[in-house]
């Protein structure tokens, strides 16, 4: 077992039974002209974590541990996109509309791809998810169970939406989860700070948080 200094107390990580889940590091959220920008967000903030997410991927690849990448995406006919999701708000472009990188949030479009710098490599698991949480309407839980995974390390965007939703889903399914603080980002700094606090509050009601350097030091020894 590996002990990682973390909030609210050290995270105990079983090598070989721990998976990295990288949430939605897609052009649609991080680059101008995608879904995140269409909602009025300043997407520049999110790009800053790319080097840390890449380093986290290197750490798991070096150890040979399970890596999962998720994409928030919908089928081209939008049959998996509830009207409530598509019609909410008053954005200039909605899910499925044409944008600078193809149709927004549609599977297979250029904008829906994961950024090259943190893209999956052969052998890693890729999950397309129609919701915010990666367990909803996906095979993720079965895949993790087949591999005997009990502990999850989280990175990606955005902290308070898809990352936190998936951590809460994981919590209810019995996983212990650690969020890497500098490998996740939000369009709203105050929401990121609040999410990190609420995850670790009440004795780790959702899970643990730690900076990447602490995780790397503990894992590499
Ligand atoms: C959002 C996500 N923010 N990946 N999606 O709509 O967090």
Image (spheres, rainbow, N blue to C red):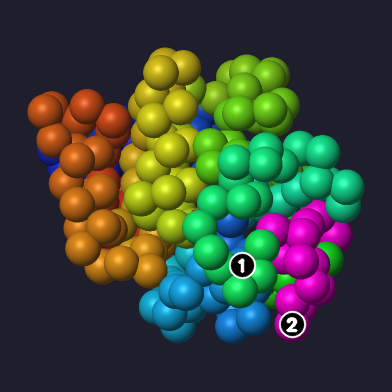
The residue that disc 1 covers is 35
Q: Is residue 144 left or right of residue 219?
A: right
Residue 170: x percent and y percent?
45, 27
Judge whether 101 appears above or below 12 on screen.
below
Dominant secondary structure (helix, strand or loop) of the stretch shown in magenta:
loop
Does residue 106 show up magenta in the picture? yes
Determine the residue positioned at 81% across, 55% down. Answer: 107
The stretch in magenta equals 95-108
Q: Position of residue 168 (x, y in %)?
A: 39, 30
Say if disc 1 is inside 8 Å of ligand 1. Answer: yes
Q: Residue at x 49, y 64 (%)?
A: 53
Earlier-in-chain disc, 1 versus 2: 1
Query: Quarter of the image containing the N terminus?
Result: top left
- In the picture, the disc for residue 25 is none
- Dot 1 crowding, Cα within 10 Å, few <14, some 14–19, many 20+: many
Instruction: Tell me, yes or no, if residue 147 can be seen here.
Output: no
Q: Nearer the viewer, residue 213 or 78?
A: 78
Left or right, residue 201 beside residue 92? left
Report the number of numbered marks.
Answer: 2
Q: Write down the residue under mark 2.
A: 100
Left/right of residue 173 with respect to residue 77 in the rendered view: left
Horizontally, residue 2 falls left or right of residue 37, namely left
């Amino acid at each position: 077992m590996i002990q990682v200094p973390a909030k609210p107390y050290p995270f105990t990580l079983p090598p070989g039974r721990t998976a990295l889940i990288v949430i939605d590091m897609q052009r649609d959220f991080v680059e101008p002209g995608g879904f995140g920008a269409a909602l009025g967000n300043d997407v520049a903030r999110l790009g800053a974590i790319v080097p840390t997410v890449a380093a986290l991927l290197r750490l798991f690849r070096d150890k040979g541990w399970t890596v999962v990448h998720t994409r928030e995406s919908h089928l081209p006919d939008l049959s998996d996109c509830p009207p409530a999701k598509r019609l909410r708000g008053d954005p200039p472009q909605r899910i499925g509309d044409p944008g600078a990188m193809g149709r927004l949030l549609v599977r297979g479009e250029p904008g829906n791809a994961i950024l090259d710098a943190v893209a999956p490599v052969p052998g890693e698991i890729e999950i397309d998810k129609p919701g915010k949480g990666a367990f909803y309407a996906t095979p993720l839980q079965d895949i993790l169970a087949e591999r005997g995974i009990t502990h999850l390390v989280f990175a990606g965007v955005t902290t308070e939406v898809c990352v936190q939703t998936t951590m809460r889903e994981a919590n209810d399914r019995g996983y212990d989860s650690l969020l890497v603080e500098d490998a996740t980002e939000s369009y709203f700094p105050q929401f990121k700070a609040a999410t990190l606090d609420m995850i670790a509050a009440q004795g780790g009601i959702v899970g643990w948080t730690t900076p990447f350097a602490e995780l790397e030091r503990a894992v590499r020894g």
